[in-house]
Amino acid sequence: MAAVPVGYEAFHSLRRRSVTLLCFILASTMAMGITVFVDSYSVHEWDKNLDVGDVAIRVTGYNIQNYIDDIQALSSITRAESLRYGYGNLERPANETEGISEFYTWGHILTPTQDFLDAFPDYITLVRGRMPENVSEITVINSLSTYYEVEIGDELQLSINDIFTPVEVVGFYSQENIGDSPYYWDYESIAIVHYNRIQALEAQLQVLIDVDRSPLTAFNPSGSLAHMNDIDNSIRMLDPNYDPVYNQYSDLWVQDYLASGISAYMYWVQGTRIAEMLRASSILLLVILVTFLAIRHNVNERRYEESMLVSRGAAKGDLERIVTREILELSIVSCLLGIPLGLLFSRIAISATSFFSFDLNLLMTEPILVSLDSLIIAVIVGVALPMLTLGGYRAVYSTKKKVEEERGRIAKIAKGLHLIRWDSLVVVIGGLLLLALSTGGSSVTSNILLSLLLPIIPLPLFLGIASLSMKALRSGANRISRGMKRFVGEIPSSIGIRRIGKEASSAGAAAMVLVLAICLSWNSAIVDVSLPVTAEYQARLAVGSDLTFILDELSYGIWDEFITNVTNNGLTTAASVVSEKPLALSAEGGGAAFLAINPAEYSSIGYDYLGNQLNDSEMSSTINQLQTTPDGAIVTSDLAIAYDLNVGDILRASAMDESALLVTFRVIGIAEALSEMPDVYDWYPYGPYPISPFMPYYYWGSQVGKWRVMVNREYLGSQFNLVNETSNFLCVKTTENANTTIIVDDLLASGGGIAFQDDEWDSVYERVHNYIDNTQYRMERAIDTMLTVLTVGSIVGAFSIYAVEGLRARRREIALLRSVGASKSTIIKAQGAEMLVLVLFSLFLLLLYSPLFLSTSISSASRSTSSIYDVYPIAVFPVIPWYTILAVLGFFIVTVTMFIIVIAALSSKIKLAESLNTAWAESGPYGGEV
Amino acid sequence: MNTDTIVDLQNVSRIYRMGEIEVHALRGVSLQIKRGQAIGIMGPSGSGKTTLLNLIGALDRPTGGRVIVDDVDITEMSESQLTNIRRDKISYVFQFFNLIPVLTAYENIELPLLISGVEEDKRKEQVDHLLSLVGLTERAEHRPDELSGGEQQRIAIARALAKPKGSASSIVVLADEPTGDLDHGTGEEILEILVSLTKGEGGTLITVTHDPEVGDMMDYVYRMRDGQVENPQ
């Protein structure tokens, strides 16, 4: 501008700035809180990723033996030693007479020197026996003993050069960081042999290195990565021909586990920060709404000053620049204040063990990690959000102005929309669409397009309801006032309540903020309770009981003893053996899994697809009928539809082997889904493969509980050899919330492990705890807790704006009432009545909107309980925690009420003369809203 | 105490302190206003006219001296006592009308009667009477933003006169530039209504004005300058 008229900066208002700042702080606090929490929590991920064991780096390459001394001399390297090894095969032929099964495996064969063992004493741990002392001896990995029953003294065949020679097992060893596993690819090595067993031409060398890890810190992951990369590069540079610019191929190939761990950590942190912020998009919507209201308030409060300045020759653009500058300044200040606040909020999250459950010790014990990235994100969000909202506000306002002045194409469109009542249309269409999608179940959540659409629909619905609510307030305030007269009195209802109609746009917005805040908190509370219950009920369907063991047919002789041990355990109450066999149903190859049960026993152990005990479910009578109708069969609904089966029809099935034995059943019931059993794997070296029946393609872990038939075990046993021709399981009912790991550990300790196949078992308890103990789940609950507390701030912001908007008029009104003799209590009642109606209106909207919003978010949340491959008949079991719901509602109502009381009390303390003698006119042609 | 005196100011002063700066709005003003009179207060801007009116109307407290309204010393009264005084004895007519925007014309006039606890049928009777006095019976259900300036000021006058029956002679109507926001013709009309209705109901009118023509309609005009009355009666 050419010249700044005097008085431009005279119209500053501390109150306007304070209210605007209060609202802006929300954005940066939220961003900072989420990112700092993720960063602080990520220290555990850092520890996990950097737990690579003693060996940090492995180096292999051409003529590596010539570089060992140089590698050892490098700085930052604390120890380095070469490890000699070969690559070979190990096998044991079967001996049926002695009941020995064959196995065949391959992998690295080590010949560690004493220097190596001294440098890395924990790399190899001798579990039993001893190290080999000659070329005919071998010490093998302990997994071979666990899974293939190899014992000391056994003779195995070892081949390093394609020629098998016998070797005697003299010991077993384990390796750090490698768990017990039947899979060959999990073995870092399979055996240790005498040095001379591997010829020079067959031998390979690698250098194992450990480094000084003290410079590595989660507080500086990029610096840590750079440090490791420097070490890697210094190793590569030992090759004189290597040049990072001109010849990037070094003779030395470096495998840096620490660098990989750090990279994985950085990738995880970055992704988690963004994912959690996106997850908080509903809260972000709330923050944007409050920011919008704050900016509108900021602009509206200046309109008189602006009008006066414009009348004195100031350009509109100059005034807009002043507003832009103030918004920018306030957003920067909000970042400075929001950052420490965000830190505080992140501690709330870090101490949350689940939704609104806190362990205060965690406040002290958990680290706090503030990364540069999180500061940058907080600043960007804290500044960008208000500035973008300002741009949006200006776009909306100029459009509105054009519409009011009936200028341009937009005015015509707006006029048309007004006639069509766009908000009613949006609410009706959005509501119907939401209803359709939220009742679609797994067919919606498994469809990418629909599942993306589902969480988006509440947004236009929210806007439509917001618009309708404001119109309702505007037109209905008089009616509400008349209705409330007998409750609050004539003056409070006439003045206090009708005021809401006059300030409908900010009153409606404040109401919607309250509604959305409560909805979001309820959503978090419901999801927190529903997801573990969903995980539990889904696990019941997948596991078939509380705890299921896969029985080993080779240990049939001790099954009874095993079952007795199980039922004698204090944490179990009942057990039953079930058998499963795949049978073909048609010549084209379609088949199903037949689950054979003892109905009397299994009805008190198994569960239906709704998570109910079978004897306490809709299936109880059908299960009983299975007892009295031995050839009865309960089929799943998809099978019934595919084969056009009804109750009473005959079901013909045949074995899938050469015998193709035909078995007939009578359909006695049709169920939505039936219990599954844990997958059975055969530990063939080529495996693992589940014993897969010939199933429709989608059987592969996709539809849980589908395409199954439940039959009587005794009847199936009359047709097949249950031990050899079926998979057998011991289904166990435990006491409530029993820790099944304790049960299994007890059984293994007493030698019972031999009875179940390869230590295979599954339990509801394990699945549920794997789910709720996993990092992502815990982080989501903690962040939900933090964001719920933050929503209180958004409510305070929105109601502050409402209270402050038109403050001059409100103060004059109060002064006028006092000047005509109204007592303070009458005035406070008027303020209170106004806020009471606003809160009641909000509660009414809550009843209207919350079912729509909650049904969507619960349906969306169900995706997190099902894996990519498993789709359950019920995507989510919604549980309403009524106490928590009421507590949250009460919490918000109390917060708003206290706020109202404070505002009402402050409003009554005004200077009469000053308020009544002011020169600004609010009524008539000078007033009205923007 | 002379029962003819409705307002008695005894050496009243009012000092406004803004940081280190002191503004002496009134300096030892003493005057007495008789019951049933129409009094004008004139003077240049900053002479203390509005401050004087605020003190008489119990909207403000004097820094020194005493303010006695209808034989009641209101100088040291508590806020709730002042509320009663405003309810029973004092009415205001402001330059910018100060009607409550969410209330209709009828309701604005009814408001003081509601506060005083007058029964509904008596309220209706009185409000209808006042509406007819100011000639706005047909505009009773309109809100202030639907009325012209003159109509709003007439409603404000009717509201000022809405006191429980029998108390008219104790009423002091304080009008601060009642015609300041109106055109000349309307202003004249308003002032005539104000004077005639106030005196007609037995009340006392004290008007602050810049308009000499207004002064001509008053029984007495006090002139103020620099916080002092130049021509006490």
Image: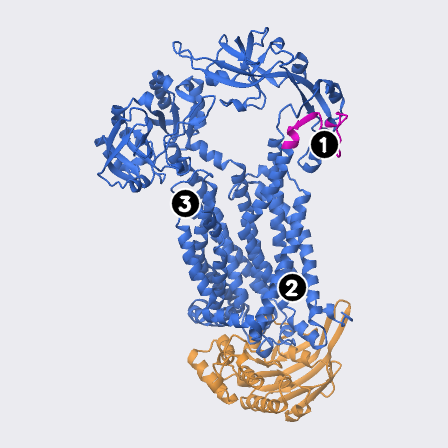
Chain colours: A blue, B orange
Part of the protein shown in magenta:
A236-260
Closer to the eye: label 3 or 2: 3
Which residue is identified by label 1?
A: A248
- What chain is tagged by disc 1? A
Residue A239 sits inside the magenta stretch: yes
Dot placed on the residue nearer the N-terminal end, 3 or 1: 1
Mark 3 secondary-structure assignment: helix
Quadrant in the rendering for residue A248: top right
Residue topped by disc 3: A442
* Mark 2, residue position: A16
Q: Main secondary structure of the magenta part?
A: loop
Q: Which one is in front, A389 or A787?
A: A389
Lower sequence index among marks 3 and 2 = 2
> Could you tell me the amino acid type at mark 3?
Ser
Q: Quadrant of residue A844?
A: bottom left
> Looking at the image, which is closer to me, A51 or A413?
A413
